[in-house]
Structure formats: structure tokens, C-alpha cells
Image: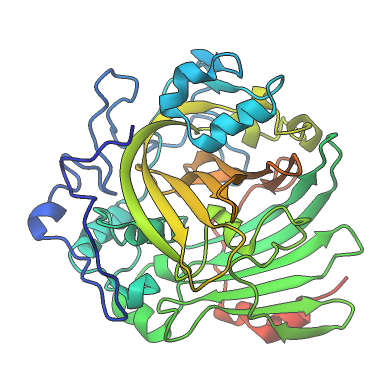
Amino acid sequence: MIKKLGLITVGLAIALSSQSVLSKVTQAEADKLGNELTPLGAEKAGNADGSIPAWTGGITELPAGYTPGSFHIDPFADDKILFTITAKNYKEYAEFLTDGQKKLFETYPDTYKMPVYQTRRSASNPQRVYDATKANATRAELLDGGNGLKGAAVGVPFPIPTNGLEAIWNHTLRYRGEAVQRNGGQAAVTASGDFNVIGFDEQLMIKYSEMGATPESLSEENILFKFKQSVTSPARLAGTALLVHETVDQVKEPRQAWTYNTGQRRVRRAPNIAYDAPGTAADGLRTTDDFDMYNGSPNRYDWELKGKKELYVAYNNYALHSDNASYADILKPNHVNPDLTRFEKHRVWVVEATLKEEFRHVYQKRTFYIDEDSWQIQVADMYDNRGELYRVGIAHGVNYYEVPTQWSTLDVYHDLNSRRYLAIGLDNEEQMYDFSIKPDDREFTPQALRREGKR
């Protein structure tokens, strides 16, 4: 059962018009942040039976032996499995599972399982993010039906959300450092377990989170982040590239995107890199707005904040993230190797997105389950236009404690119709993410994309 919070009212009837939507909270409410609420707005206390502990700051120190730039040491390597959820017993835990998770047990009864461990509320961010979040709480506002925002920078914009749009913007703008270089890839796995890894070189420049970013500077430039992706393998796709500029006010100026095609050797505008356009080299297993569990303009859906519930989610997945695990170890028929996964009970916000009548999308409804401690979407259940479960997305997270930030290491999208899945974020055989890069805006232009577009 989804519970309604006593601390805030989540059942508000918010009329989202074409004008600015008042979303600020009072100073008295904001003062709960860092007290009964965590600095990002989660309930600091544990749950009634103690299966979810109190939040005490998350990971605040680097584990002994860890060197920035190397793969992340598991701070909880000594934890033992408490119990395992399988197709035989999942109904006993149904209260703490999503419909999509239940469907995975039913679809793969002989192999799918969830090893459940002690809950570790490891999520943490730098103090400046906490300070900015508290400032945002009393000044951030949604714009034009939620298709943009103002009055926020660096921290979570709406730590005490009153509607589903605010919660989904919190996911979009959760802290992931100021910039990051990622080398890795994705694999579309067949029902028999065959796969080919598509290699990517990605750079993310997060203007929203930069040191010194202000609501005024973000509004003036109208850029939240810049993202650049180039395919590195296989050879037939190498050099294909994508550039995205995500805007603050998406009505004033929508997302700007460009692609470089190695065959044509030219850069083209790509206005269709949005919504349910097929994801890059994803073999039809995800949409563009599935990336990062959800991204882009929210204007095609009505968003409802349903409340909170306790849920078993993939958390602290350091074994799945380790360089001791090869891609062949991870990618198995039907789903990733469950022996490398770790599930814990956490509280999540539940947000339901229903397609507006005037729009089209392959997903008629989507339900997102968002970690209260980090604002990372943990599970996404996607329904087709018949109202049937179509896909299930699961984010396997870790704390990148050198930043620090709680972020998924591997996003897995299960297509229930084809009985295939797509794994995004494979990095076990690559160099680890580099959060220390200092990119320049000149590296995120169509001209730079053309220069870099080589086979």
C-alpha cells in the first residue's frame, strides 16, 4: 500500500496552466531539511520495524585502499544475504514489489531472483548541494505546465515535492558532479543470451551543478546540461555521434540536438531525438526518453504524485560494478546475472505518468519509483496503449563516493514482449568514470562534433 505522508500533502490538486506554477514551500517547511528530513528531503528516521534504518549521512569518507580513478571498493562486502525472493515466494513480498518486478518473476520463474541484503542508506552529496537544496526549496518554481523551471541551481529543486512534475524534475536535476567522462557501452541481449557490446565515449557537462551556478545565470544561458556521445565500436558504427543541449525553459527553447553520420560525413539537426524515438543503437529495446530511466520534456504526460512506499530496489551494487566481473559474467539469458545483484528495502516516491489525449507515445502509462535519499529513479514500469505491461526498467546503483553521488552503474530495460533486455552502462572492462574533467563549452558545439566524427 502507498502511504500518504503526514509531513507534507501529496494529494494536492495542482492546476498546471500555461503560466508559472507556484511550487515554493514556506521557510518553516524548508527548515525541516537537515532536521526531521534529510538535506535532500527524505525522511531521516527509519521505518517502524527497523528494516530501513535512519539516514546518518550516507558515505562521507573514501573506503580504505580506494584511489580516485580506480574501480570502487565495496564498502559493504562483508554483508550477507538475508533472504532471496524467487518465483516460488515472491507473493509473500508482494507489498514491497512493483507490478513490473512481479512480472519478471512470472516471466522467468526458473532463473530470476532478488538476493536481499541489509539496507544501507549510503546516498550522499557535498555540503554545497545540501545548502543549495535548502535555498531552492523556498524559491524554485515550475514554468509553463512544468516544461521548465526557475529559481533553482546546483541542488535538488523541489526537496519537498507537492506534485509529480516536481518529483520528476528532482530526478532530472539530481546531483551527479559538475562533469563526467564515461567510457563503456550497452548490449541488447537476445532470449538465448547472445549479445554484442556497442561501445560509447560520453561526456556530460552539467551547467546546473557547476560551482557558482545561480538561478539567474542558468535562466540567462537557458542550458541545464550538455551531453556528447560517440560510438567507438563495432567498426561499422564507430564515429557516429550525438550532441544534446538540454534547456532550462523548454518552451522558450526546446532541447537542441545534432547527429554526425560517418557515411555522410556531416552534422545534421536532430529534432526527433526526444520522446519515443528509438534509442541510439538500442535494437528497438528502449525509447529516447527511457535513457537515464527518464529524461526530456514532461509535456506529453499528466503527472501524479501517489505518495511513498517501501520497495525492494537494486542498491549498492558494487559486485555488478566491479572490474572482477566481465560482460560475459553479467549478461545472461533473460536478465543480468542475479548472483551479482544486491537488493535492499528503501522508501521510494511513486509517480504515475499518464499520456495526455492529444499526444502519442508508445507508453500510455509509466510508473516511476524514485529513491527518497537520492532522487534516482530505481524502477520504471511502462505500459503500452492496451494498458498492458510492456517494459520494466531497473537501475542498479552505487555511491560514487569520490564525488559523492548516488547514481546507477547499470540500467537494464526488460522488454516483456520480445523477452529480451538492454543493459546500458557496461564499464567493467573499461576505464572508470572520470568526474575530475574540466570540459569547455567549445567541446560541445556542432563544429566540434564534426571535427571529432571519425571512423
Assign the C terminus to one quadrant of the image: bottom right
Q: How is the image coloured?
A: rainbow
At 28% from the left and 17% from the top, the residue drawn is 49
Q: How many marks?
A: 0
The single residue placed furthest to the front in the displayed view is: 386
Residue 81 appearing in the image: no
Horizontally, residue 380 falls left or right of residue 104, namely left
Is residue 170 shown above or below 57?
Answer: below
> Left or right: where does residue 360 sit relative to residue 217?
right
Q: Quadrant of residue 348?
A: top left
Residue 305 seen in the figure = yes
Seen in the picture, residue 209 relative to 187 is either above or below; the reply is below
Residue farthest to the left, as pictured: 28
212 or 389, nearer to the observer: 389
- Above or below 231: residue 375: above
Q: Residue 424 at x, y = what percent? A: 67, 49
Q: Residue at x 48, y 69 (%)?
A: 357
Residue 289: x percent and y percent?
A: 58, 62
Q: Position of residue 226 (x, y in %)?
A: 55, 72
Q: At 32% across and 36% down in the image, what residue appears?
A: 2
> In the image shown, does 290 or 303 lie closer to the viewer?
303
Residue 64 lies, in percent from the top left, at 49, 29
Write the residue at 56% across / 40% down. Answer: 67
Q: Quadrant of the N terminus?
A: top left
